[in-house]
Amino acid sequence: MKWTDINNIAIALMDLYPDINPQYVRFTDLYQWVIKLNEFDDEPKRSSEKILEAIQLAWIKDAD
């Protein structure tokens, strides 16, 4: 998984953290959770606030 795999990352996070409301997740926590995913294989420094926001929004959408 790469940073550009927004929906796949959101689904993986939803599966790992089913009791978390993604609306209240801080970007610092989100970043750490993404880079710790077993399937994640990208340069951690390629992240940006825009990417993290897109992941969070996808997670919120998938959680509904």
Image (cartoon, helix red, strand yellow):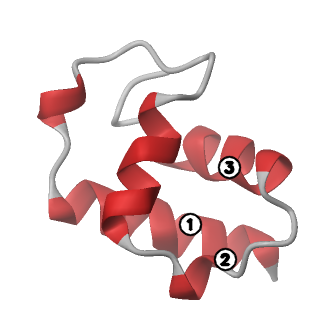
Q: Which residue is found at the position 32% from the left and 17% from the top? A: 42
Q: Amino acid at mark 3?
A: Leu
Q: Which residue is mark 2?
A: 61
Category of crowding for the residue at label 2, using alpha-carbon neighbours closer than 10 angstroms: few (below 14), some (14–19), many (at least 20): few
User: Residue tagged by mark 1?
Assistant: 58
Residues at discs 3 and 1 in contact (Cβ within 8 Å)? no
Residue 17 % position (x, y): 78, 57
| Amino acid found under the numbered disc labelled 2 | Lys
Name the spot of residue 51 as percent of width and height, x first: 27, 55
Q: Nearer the viewer, mark 3 or mark 1?
A: 3
Task: Compare marks 3 and 1 and give the one earlier in the sequence.
Answer: 3
Whole-percent x, y for residue 12 in the image: 71, 41
Mark 2 vs mark 3, CA separation in Å: 13 Å
Give the answer, above or below, for where 40 lies relative to 52: above
User: Residue tagged by mark 3?
Assistant: 13
- Residue at position x 63%, y 66% in the image: 59
Disc 1 secondary structure class: helix
Q: Amino acid at mark 1?
A: Ala
- Dot 3 lies on which element? helix
Which quadrant is home to the C terminus? bottom right
In three-dimensional space, the C-alpha distance between marks 2 and 1, rounded to whole angstroms, equals 5 Å
